[in-house]
């Protein structure tokens, strides 16, 4: 009866993630306070013998002391469920949620229950969380798949309230690596694949197309900032691949980062990496014991709020300081690619004599991407370029197969198809050729996916004379395959000769009528150098004095439009 009474008092709130967004924007706080009432830690109250009542009073004291600093409250159902008799504990939980709804209606409530079961059982859990207890959102285990999540993000006959959920991705406990950190045969760790699936589920399960906010967020412990960084980077790449008007119309999913305080999580680093290299990532920092058992919970909440905001401001300032000029429209992945190429010494500045006899102020050798990490980063840069140039607005590729011309193209093509799957969930074929025909086994010069009658995208590092690309086009034509374009790492954008004012890239595009794209080109490289020199001046060690002038002069002499 107590629970039914609570439900009748509880007003339906707006959609959880919209409510969270509005709250954080309104008060400038990204602090989530966990309510974990451990009976042995909370005080006795005069004249109160019922543990449920003790817990309720303690939670109200915490809420009333901290609400002005709080973006969200997160009561942990386990600490209420363990109260005897059970009706007292559940009633206490419902009363706490009802108090927040009536006294502080703009603050969303996230029920920390970590549910996850077959569809019909999840239907019942959703009713319990949303209809009975009145929570706005809930934490879930994703390991039983989309069916176990659907009832918590869609209205149904059983549950008419629409909530939102955070799914466990890489949790704050030490042993989470035993499962969530394990590598999978399909590539990436379990938690990286949970990240990808959560976005796919959000697109598929969220039926309200007009809603800008996501329906699903990710729990990533602040005790592992590297995992926070990985998840935030994956979310950013998915956004980037969608592009303006692309397949994702919603804002980037939230990261819920527990573990700050008693568990030793790194607040500053977690906030910094969660915001991503573009500064658009969103993180909700969850703190429980650090606030609840402080001498002055309100004061401690205020201090944490300021710490989180200071970390956000510092992260945004770093992004702004590191951003490139919009004059040539460098995208984040292009800036990251140039920075990484410099760090790996794949790209060098100085004075280099090329095969053509020209003296170039820079030299690029993709063969120096030669470690697992380097090849992974390279593959992602190619994948970002491919998604930007060869995906339609719905995220559908305009090709069926990636083809890597021997020899460098073979490894590059393999990296690209892997990155397309990992970053975008796009699974396309991969093929390559041999220099010499094989007279045994499968025979011939082609290996990999069938390309007859298929649309094929070619991958290579650079185009110098264009010989390899032209031979590849001839080979594809002989099997009735259709080349749709070529993607290279660097377009030097320089004339083939002073008498022929087109580049090798332009010549291929002209002769075959296909689109050519590059991760970066000489004009973008020049803009990167200009921006870095303006920003860092003499502090930069990768780009020496006079390099910008040398690149400008080289482009004036050899560059193409």
Image (tube, grey):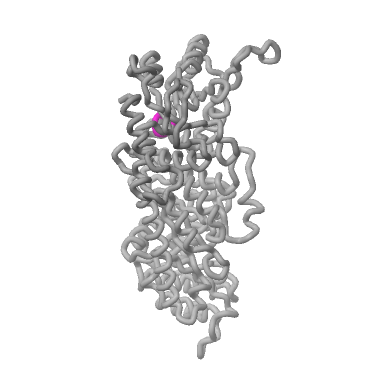
Compared to residue 42, the image places residue 235 above or below, namely above
Q: Position of residue 526 (x, y in %)?
A: 36, 36
Residue shown at 57% from the left, 75% from the top? 38
| Quarter of the rendering containing residue 547 | top left
Q: How many marks?
A: 0
Q: x%, y% of residue 166?
A: 49, 55
Q: Which residue lies most toward the bottom here?
A: 46
User: Is 388 one of the magenta-colored residues?
Assistant: yes
Where is residue 63? Give x, y as percent: 42, 75
* Position in image of residue 508 (x %, y %): 40, 17
Residue 316 vertical placement versus 332 (above, below)? below
Q: Nearer the viewer, residue 531 or 430?
A: 531
Q: Residue furthest right?
A: 440
Residue range corresponding to the magenta coloring: 386-390
Q: Would you say the magenta stretch is mainly helix, strand or loop?
A: helix
Residue 71 in view? yes
Q: Residue furthest left?
A: 327
Residue at coordinates 54% horizontally, 50% vertically from top-left? 148
Q: Nearer the viewer, residue 128 or 174?
A: 174
Report which quarter residue 523 is drawn in: top left
Instruction: Name the residue: 39% across, 64% down.
Output: 309
Above or below for 167 versus 296: above
Residue 243 visible to the viewer? no
Q: Is residue 293 above or below residue 468?
A: below
Q: Quadrant of the C terminus?
A: top left
Magenta residue check for 290? no
Q: Residue at x 50, y 17 (%)?
A: 468
């Amino acid at each position: 009866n107590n629970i039914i009474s609570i439900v009748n008092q509880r007003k339906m709130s707006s959609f959880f993630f919209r409510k969270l967004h509005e709250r954080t924007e309104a008060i400038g706080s990204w602090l989530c306070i966990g309510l974990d009432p451990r009976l042995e830690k909370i005080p006795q109250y005069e004249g109160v013998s019922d543990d449920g009542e003790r817990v309720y009073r303690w939670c109200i004291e915490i809420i009333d002391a901290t609400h002005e600093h709080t973006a969200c409250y997160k009561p942990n159902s386990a600490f209420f469920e363990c109260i005897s008799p059970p009706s007292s504990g559940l009633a206490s939980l419902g009363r706490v949620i009802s108090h927040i709804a009536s006294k502080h209606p703009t603050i969303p409530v996230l029920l920390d229950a970590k549910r996850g079961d077959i569809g019909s059982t999840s239907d019942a859990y959703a009713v319990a969380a949303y209809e009975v207890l009145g929570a706005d959102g809930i934490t879930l285990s994703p390991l039983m798949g989309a069916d176990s999540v659907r009832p918590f993000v869609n209205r149904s006959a059983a549950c008419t309230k629409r909530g939102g959920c955070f799914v466990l991705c890489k949790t704050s406990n030490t042993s989470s690596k035993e499962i969530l950190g394990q590598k999978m045969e399909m590539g990436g760790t379990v938690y990286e694949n949970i990240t990808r699936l959560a976005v796919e589920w959000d697109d598929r399960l969220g039926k309200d197309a007009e809603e800008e906010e996501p329906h699903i967020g990710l729990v990533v412990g602040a005790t592992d900032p590297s995992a926070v960084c990985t998840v935030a980077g994956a979310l950013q790449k998915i956004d980037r691949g969608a592009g303006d008007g692309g397949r994702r119309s919603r804002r980037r999913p939230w990261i819920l980062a527990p573990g700050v305080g008693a568990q030793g999580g790194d607040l500053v680093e977690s906030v910094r990496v969660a915001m991503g290299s573009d500064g658009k990532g969103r993180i909700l920092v969850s703190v429980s014991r650090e606030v609840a058992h402080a001498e002055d919970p309100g004061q401690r909440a205020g201090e944490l709020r300021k710490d989180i905001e200071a970390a956000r401001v510092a992260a945004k300032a770093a992004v702004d300081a590191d951003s490139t000029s919009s004059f040539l429209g460098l995208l984040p992945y292009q800036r990251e690619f140039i920075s990484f190429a410099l760090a790996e010494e794949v790209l060098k500045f100085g004075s280099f004599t090329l095969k053509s006899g020209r003296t170039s102020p820079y030299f690029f050798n993709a063969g120096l991407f030669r470690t697992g990490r380097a090849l992974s980063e390279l593959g992602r840069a190619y994948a970002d370029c491919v998604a930007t140039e060869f995906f339609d607005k719905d995220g559908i590729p305009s090709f069926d197969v990636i083809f890597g011309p021997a020899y460098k193209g073979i490894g590059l093509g393999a990296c690209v198809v892997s990155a397309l799957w990992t970053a975008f969930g796009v699974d396309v074929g991969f093929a390559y050729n041999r220099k010499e025909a094989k007279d045994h086994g499968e025979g011939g010069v082609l290996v990999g996916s069938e390309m007859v009658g298929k649309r094929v995208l070619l991958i290579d590092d650079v185009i110098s004379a264009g010989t390899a690309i032209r031979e590849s086009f001839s080979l594809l034509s002989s099997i009735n395959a259709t080349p749709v374009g070529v993607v290279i790492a660097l377009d030097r954008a320089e004339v083939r000769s002073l008498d022929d004012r087109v580049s090798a890239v332009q010549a291929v595009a002209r002769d075959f009528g296909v689109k050519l794209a590059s991760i970066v080109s000489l004009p973008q490289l020049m803009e990167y150098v200009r921006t870095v020199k303006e920003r860092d001046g003499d502090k930069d060690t990768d780009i020496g004095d006079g390099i910008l002038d040398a690149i400008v002069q080289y482009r004036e002499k050899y560059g193409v439009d």
